[in-house]
Image (tube, coloured by chain):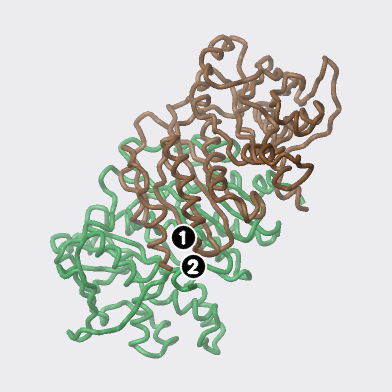
Chain colours: A brown, B green
Amino acid sequence: MSGEFSLIDKYFAHKQQQRKDVVLAQGDDCAIVAPPADSHIAISTDTLVSGTHFLSDADPAWIAHKALASNISDLAAMGASPAWVSMGISLPEVNEPWLERFCSAFFSLADYYGIQLIGGDTTKGPLTITLTVQGTIPHGKALTRGGANSGDWIYVTGFLGDAKAGLDVILENNISADKAFNHELEKRHFKSTPRVLAGIALRDIASAAIDISDGLISDLGHILKRSNVGARIDVDLLPISSELMQFVNSLDIAKQYALTSGEEYELCFTVPEANRGQLETALSNTPFTCIGQITGTGNLDLHSNDQPLDWQLGGYDHFKVSQ
Amino acid sequence: MSGEFSLIDKYFAHKQQQRKDVVLAQGDDCAIVAPPADSHIAISTDTLVSGTHFLSDADPAWIAHKALASNISDLAAMGASPAWVSMGISLPEVNEPWLERFCSAFFSLADYYGIQLIGGDTTKGPLTITLTVQGTIPHGKALTRGGANSGDWIYVTGFLGDAKAGLDVILENNISADKAFNHELEKRHFKSTPRVLAGIALRDIASAAIDISDGLISDLGHILKRSNVGARIDVDLLPISSELMQFVNSLDIAKQYALTSGEEYELCFTVPEANRGQLETALSNTPFTCIGQITGTGNLDLHSNDQPLDWQLGGYDHFKVSQ
């Protein structure tokens, strides 16, 4: 088998149309990009490790999708337009069919979002993928976690909880006899849709935003902490898919899945009362649901039928889980 | 032990003075930076894997130094000024003394070069460190591999070969009885000095540049390929340290170490005849040596005492080595 350089040439280099703002892509010590005038750059890094974030026999196309989609979702949460991505990938061996499937899915998603792979590093080691994505955003328009105010309405995009049901299928917990149904849930775990257009549309509307990677409770908690506010969530409003209901067969469990499911890559965002009208037109192509309101309490309170709930739920944390 | 978020807070977040061009560092979905007007951005990614790039019991301070220095060296090779770095790090466990030594060395080097850690990801997994560094460079001033012309002179900074001697010590090949001497060579393997000021000074002087990460022959080969030229190297001119001579105890072997030693992180660059005078003043604080000249042949020829040499030497390639 060929060496590292030809591996990069064969699978990773120059597989996409060159963006106009990419001066130099792979093939030198650095890539060179030309950021647009009057723009800031949003930068996010995520690492996926075999055995921690996916099983070693997971479909490489799904791994690629998840790695890139989860990173693009971070750009979406800031309201940034995806631009460039760098990849550090460690591979235990050169497995050409694996690489072909991985790269095909990676570039297909990258092309869809107009994000160009500009460089990276290919090394020998346990399967690990670290992506650093970059996006552009007009000065002062970034959506942060710190802008929520008491009275703002809390929204989420899409449905919540399906990714956790998909994880159950992958880990063979409580799976159904219906293989096609299992496969659909598994796919939802890996094949999320980053809400890029929604993020861009929310630049002038939302007061704060985050993507749901660690679970709604945990991620909304970040907004509350940064914004120094509280929240009241009406769990009866949580958007739950019919597939999730079919899978867990209990509305309460479905709600708990929706509150704690990580790796959803939906957006959670807050909108001041005055901007709610604009929201309806701005997000006309993205499903979204109001699930509660920001409060001045400092607590995250769950309600159902106007009664407080005392569910003890947490988000996902790699080190906490394992120790 | 605390979870991922407190791990990031405790060791990685906000340990440095904020650069003026960093709008938002750790703590949101993305970092936000404000690139200077009229600048391009140089971006490089490198991955270090335990067992491939260093032994699992290597000093964490040296691992941190090597990881960051090797990346900054890529910026230096383009003539870029270091600005921002993102880190994806996988750790098999939370080892606080290890993290303290790692972070202390990392931030010490980062502060020295004025590069700010703006974000990243901390995950559980086999020890792997992927850094993406970014630097700024005035429009059109990047030093690439593609600009060398026949007649240009070939230079290298510093001494070559010491990193390979250090690797011999680490792998316990042919080591000396002198422990302090061994330690000094080992240190040279890990503690290279990226030639940032030299790279910046060469912006208007050099026609092409690369950093020596895979060995002089391999890396100069990249310049030749991109520039569509050849080179004649006079091996008698190679800069060899007295320590390397003492270690290998043979001038020919020392030269071969200098030609093939990877992970040197010195610069190899080419300078047109007309710019040689400027070079002397521009690099007044960096040792550099002329080792040969670019030719029109397309080959990389080695000479000694005006006679051709037929040494068969290669560079380093992870996958080639292991298969």
In the picture, the disc for residue B13 is none
Vertical placement of A177 versus B166: above or below? above
- The amino acid type of the residue labelled 1 equals Ala
Question: CA separation, marks 1 and 2?
Answer: 8 Å
In the picture provided, is B61 more to the left or to the right than A171? left
How busy is the neighbourhood of tag 1: few (under 14 within 10 Å), some, or many (20 plus)? many
Say above or below: B214 vs B130: below
Q: Chain of mark 2?
A: B
Q: Nearer the viewer, residue B71 or A92?
A: A92
Identify the residue at image location x=61%, y=51%: A58
Q: Secondary structure beneath disc 2?
A: loop
Left or right of B36 in this view: B290: left
x%, y% of residue A119? Answer: 41, 51
Q: Which residue is mark 2?
A: B191
Dividing the image into 4 quarters, which one contains the N terminus of chain A? bottom left
Camera-side residue of A91 and A142: A91
Q: B99 and B288: which one is in front? A: B99
Kindly identify the residue that appears in the image at 65 percent across and 41 percent down. Answer: A183
Same subunit, tags 1 and 2? yes
Give the residue type that dot 2 points to: Lys
Residue A47 locus on image (x, y percent): 58, 49
Residue A77 at x, y percent in the picture? 55, 31
Name above or below for residue A265 compared with residue B92.
above
| Image mark for residue B69 | 1
Residue A244 at x, y percent in the picture: 72, 31
At a point 57% along the width and 58% down the height, the residue shown is: A127
Dot 1 falls on a residue whose secondary structure is helix
Position of residue A80 in the picture relative to residue B206 (left or right): right
Q: Are marks 1 and 2 in contact (CB under 8 Å)?
A: yes
